[in-house]
Image: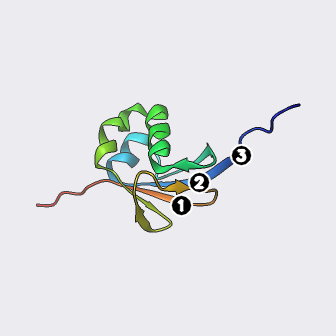
Amino acid sequence: MNEAPPARSRVLVLLFSVLRERIGASTLAVDLEDPVTTHALLERLAEAHPRIRATLPSIRVAVNQEYVGREHLVRAGDEVALITPVSGG
């Protein structure tokens, strides 16, 4: 008997500041297997865009405009914002 392929989720990822500069886009549509944690999403993005790996520890993640932890499950249709610290002066 054939097993069904894993379900896929498409999420919209919003990029700001240094992430936007290093990836060269302000948004990404990302397909991931369901369910996926925000941590797994960040790892996937770092694999695809190695220049952002060093920024991962300082990134805050918001899903549907609410800050969440690294174990939050991201679902199909979610909007994920990756927010880097800003410095002023």
The residue wearing badge 3 is 7
Looking at the picture, how far across and down is residue 14, in whole percent?
47, 56
Of badges 1 and 3, the one in the foreground is 3
State the mark number for residue 79.
1
- Tag 1 and tag 2, C-beta contact below 8 Å: yes
Name the element at disc 2: strand
Name the element at disc 3: loop
What's the residue at 89%, 31% (across, down)?
Answer: 1
Comes first in the chain, label 1 or label 2: 2
Looking at the picture, how far across and down is residue 70, in whole percent?
41, 51
Of badges 2 and 3, the one in the foreground is 3
What's the residue at 33%, 51% (across, down)?
Answer: 59
The residue wearing badge 2 is 11
In this image, 51 relative to 40: left or right?
left
In this image, 27 relative to 5: left or right?
left
The amino acid type of the residue labelled 3 equals: Ala
